[in-house]
Image (cartoon, helix red, strand yellow):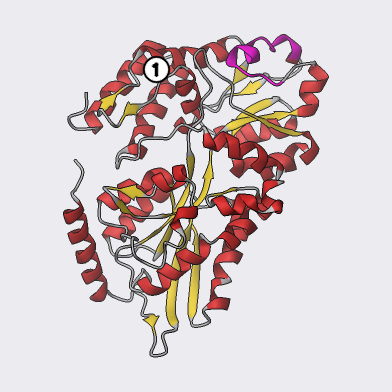
Amino acid sequence: MRRSIGTTAVIAALALAATACGSDDGGSNNAGGGGADGELSGTVTFWDTSNETEAAVFKAVAEEFSEEHPDVEVDYVNIGWDGAQDRFKNAAGANEAPDVMRTEVAWVSDFASLGYLQPLDGTPALDNEDDFLEQAWASTQYEDATYAVPQVIDTLALFYNKQLLDDAGVEVPESLEDIKNSVDAFSDLEAPFYLRGDDPYWFLPYIYGEGGDLVDAESETVTIGDPSGVAAFEAVQDLLDSGAAITDTVDGWDNMMGMFADGDVAMMINGPWAINDAREGIGEENLGVAPVPAGSETQGAPQGGWNYGVYAGSGNLDASYEFVKYMSSADVQQRITEELSLLPTRESVYEIDSVSSNEMVEFFKPAVEVAQERAWIPEANSLFDPLGEEVEAMLLGQATAEETAETIADRYRGLLDGWQ
């Protein structure tokens, strides 16, 4: 059940009070703020969830904040994304969370509902908020308040090896049916397509492609058990049974990237965060990107991305606000795009030549504009475990597509009290 704004504010206030009485345990109890001359001071601890390729850039950018504010030290910690949601919640519950967290878009409402994020409306953290993309801004809202600031936005797309498609005489597929029809042309490969089977986020395009979704937040209805959900799982199974796809339910990321780099598969679904790794694997000139293949109804990919949140129990809110303002600024977003080809969340950054001419931005910006918005509810990320576990059982031959959809729907109703 959602908490009211009043309850959230009370929890946040209690967290702040606890911080004032906290111990020197290495958490967010940082002495600091504005000095007598108004200059910021103290330490800002920043938990970054970026991958290994991105981390060096984010670390350098974050630590350069101290060049603008010499009396503030940035304690940069890369924690990766795996398990980061629970790690932050555990740390916040123990009053040991970082001052600033790079949070996946679906985590914001969860953290906010627990009172772990500081409301940012009216604070320096929100600078030129009208410049943010509408769909990126939506993920920062919970119960009519702002609890995060957009960092990057993304979606999924089809990555393909141009040389392998050219050698096989195959056009870039526009649908799952096109991929199935390419099996004979790629007879010398393990399979034309790598279907990631160990991460439920990668199943969303198949569900959207059949006109479905996990839930309908507006009507508080579970929809994964509808015929569209059954059709999505049948489409996944059909790709594998036909030999059009290969999968792995254990080490999907490493196997997918390795097989794509080695030319064992010609195509995979991935996001902007994988661009540099994919280019390194097959050569920049060989990487092509296209919309995710359509299912029987439509083409659809999920809206993803990352935001900055400020811990409600931070002992250095003044410096944390300014740090978030800096990290989400147009200048920093431009640099991140130039160095990592990640998509900015500010409209103004897309007007800069070095950004607008970026090959990956040229594709992913239109894709993001039509990406399917997910349900921004506190339980949103909890929906992935049942999805992943039940589809894995299907891939292992332990359930049919219909049984899979029905079981996931039942588990969702157990998670979402009162939903139909």
Q: Nearer the viewer, residue 192 or 320?
A: 320
Q: Is residue 175 magenta?
A: yes
Q: Nearer the viewer, residue 327 or 362?
A: 362
Q: Is residue 312 above or below residue 179?
A: below
Q: Residue at x 54, y 72 (%)?
A: 65
Kindly tell me whether residue 83 is visible in this rendering: no
In the drawing, does residue 320 fall left or right of residue 119?
right
Q: Residue furthest bottom?
A: 36
Q: Is residue 70 above or below residue 116?
A: below
Place of residue 417 in the rendered image (x, y in percent of width and height, measured from the top left):
19, 32
Tell me which segment is drawn in magenta.
172-185
Asked which quadrant contains residue 24, the reply is: bottom left
Residue at point 40%, 15% (across, down) = 228
Label 1, secondary structure: give it. helix
Question: Which quadrant of the rendered structure holds the C terminus?
Answer: top left
From this viewpoint, which residue is outermost toward the right? 167
- Location of the N terminus by quadrant is top left
Answer above or below: position of 320 versus 191. Answer: below
Of 344 and 131, the residue lying toward us: 131
* Residue to which mark 1 is pinned: 229
| Residue 26 visible at all | yes
Residue 142 vertical position relative to residue 19 in the rendered view, above or below: above
Q: Is residue 227 magenta?
A: no
Q: Residue 356 placed where, x, y %?
A: 67, 47
